[in-house]
Amino acid sequence: MSLSNPDPSRRGVIAATAAGLAGLAAPLPMRAQPEAPVATSAQGRLRGVRDRGVCVFRGIPYAGAVSGPAGRFKSPPPPPSWTGVRDATQLGAPAIQPVGGPGTGAEPAPSENCLFLNVWTPAVDGRRRPVMFYSHGGGFTVGSGGRAYQDGANLAREQDVVVVASNHRLGLFGYLYLGGLLGPEYEGNQGLADLAAALKWVHGNIAAFGGDPANVMIFGESGGGGKTKCLYAMPSVAPYFNKASIESAIGPEARSPDDATEVARGLLKALGLSDPRQLLTIPAADLLRYQVGEGPALPPGTLPPSGPPVRDRGRDFWPFVDGRILPATPFKTGAPAVSASKPLIVGGCKDEAVFFSLGDPSAFSLDDAGLRSRLARTLGDRADAWIETFRRTRPGANPSQLYMAILTATPWRAHAVHLAEAKAAQAKAPVYSYILSYDSQATVPGTTYRLGSPHASDIAMKFNNVDPATAPAGAGGSAGFGRDTSEARLQTGRNMSTMWGAFARTGRPAAPGQPAWPAYALDRRSTMLIDAQCRVVDDPESEERRFWQSQPNAERIA
């Protein structure tokens, strides 16, 4: 499957509308909190706000400046300290990325100095609550920890947990490697080093926010799932978390320092630069313009608008295997040994591929010829075998439904199963497999095609941001998710967020009124189908799974 031209900024249009009810266990009574809660970190005191029954601290610097000749393309320095009480009521700047995308209205303009995080906690009271550390989606090129659809207030309040989300360097600024040209102080994988610094900050400071530094869960969706995969394989962060959830994961693919150095040489050539040190002072906007493609000429220093580029080079700036920060491609030859003892959830959405065709209404009204033509572009002469198999397993499906099912199987389902198999084979800690199988009756805008559970529709579910009555401001969107306010969708959100909260607390996902969730094992392949009424099914795609596991590169995002 080729994802060379999806517009990752569409993640910002996901309608995550919010709510949730009781957690697995009733939260303990909270102490009375002032209207402006104050917490004391190692760097200084912070004043937050009260929002929907929780304390929220925004824009907390977890590392120092990473701009200009002293900091650009280097690992993050320690965070600054301050005297007095720092205001923590406003979001920090997101990473440099195309501007003007939906869902960014409450955030400052993108900036190189973007190393901020947000904390949602039921109370600043000395309790030791589970901590849920979220890495946002958007590939490795767009997004932020401040987007409303992943607001952590409902999850924190209902599950009695502390939620943390960070901004970190993305794209060229996060993954341009200059170590081969300028020396070892430019060790690369800056974006991953940022996440490591954020987790280190959590370890040292989260007790001041009512969290337990000895009980930290990392989780993330799509690009955030890819980042979580990397964290799961990184020795530098192994002491800072205890369990993980990898959701609809993409990337990173295997790249070496030599590969990354060639990308840097290509950048120098394209910009007409002879000395790589010039990259440390060139305007950030000029670097971003190169990353997003060779579009219409813009004045020097002007940020390009959002929208489809002529040639998106974002995939050139993903993590690479450097041997230290990222020792190996995560899960390539098995589950990472460094996290062998850490329980894992892994899975994705039933209809992942629908999301990536939202801008192409014709994909939802295909005939047989259109189905075969489209699949031939990505599967070549193997397209007929895929169609034949899926027609047999889904006899009532029309051509568009077959198209979406096949492009969900490869790579999304194939990769999720690979991760579950690798962790189960390691046999050191349990892995729990799931599919978000809720079948939304809302339709793809401009069509009569039902949304089902597309890629990214799980974000609202995990954070229980589903009910418009309790949605954070700005959480609505236009992808169609928000038009479904049925009780079934609300119940699905309650189930999923409660399961994730229980996993954060105990290492085992569970929700009242739902079946027990058994660990995944190779002999049964038990998988939780998450819905208003959940079901456990053994090997739910058995015939399809056997087929796509026989195909070359079925799980590779090419």
Image (tube, grey):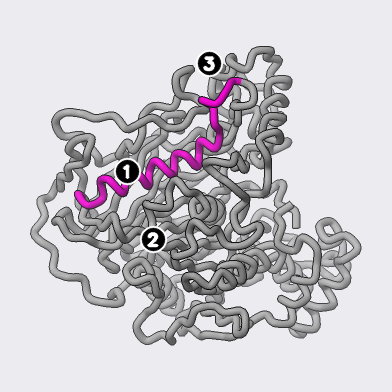
Compared to residue 549, the image places residue 191 above or below, namely above
Mark in the foreground, 3 or 2: 2
Considering the numbered disc 2 on the image, is that residue within a helix, a strand or a loop? Answer: loop
Compared to residue 172, the image places residue 375 above or below, namely below
Circle nearer the N terminus (1, 3): 1
Residue 189 is covered by the magenta coloring = yes
From the image, give the main secondary structure of the stretch colored magenta.
Answer: helix
- At x 49%, y 56%, the residue is 338
- Quarter occupied by residue 142: top right
What label sits on residue 242 in the rendered view?
2
To which residue does mark 1 refer?
201
- Quarter occupied by residue 392: bottom right
Compared to residue 8, the image places residue 465 above or below, namely below
Instruction: For the residues labelled 3 and 2, say whether their Cβ atoms are less than 8 Å apart.
Output: no
Residues packed near mark 1 inside 10 Å, few (<14), some (14 to 19) or many (20 plus): many
For the residue marked with disc 1, what is the amino acid? Trp
Q: CA distance from mark 1 to mark 3?
A: 29 Å
- At x 57%, y 35%, the residue is 175
To which residue does mark 3 refer?
281
Q: Which residues are magenta?
A: 182-208
Circle nearer the N terminus (2, 1): 1
For the residue marked with disc 2, what is the amino acid? Asn
Is 384 left or right of 509, judged from the image as shown? right
Is 204 left or right of 538, judged from the image as shown? left
Circle nearer the N terminus (3, 2): 2
Which quadrant, please, contains the N terminus? bottom right
Q: CA distance from mark 2 to mark 1?
A: 16 Å
- Coordinates of residue 236 in the picture (x, y in percent): 44, 45
Res. 307 visible in picture: yes
- Coordinates of residue 56 in the picture (x, y in percent): 25, 50
For the residue marked with disc 3, what is the amino acid? Thr
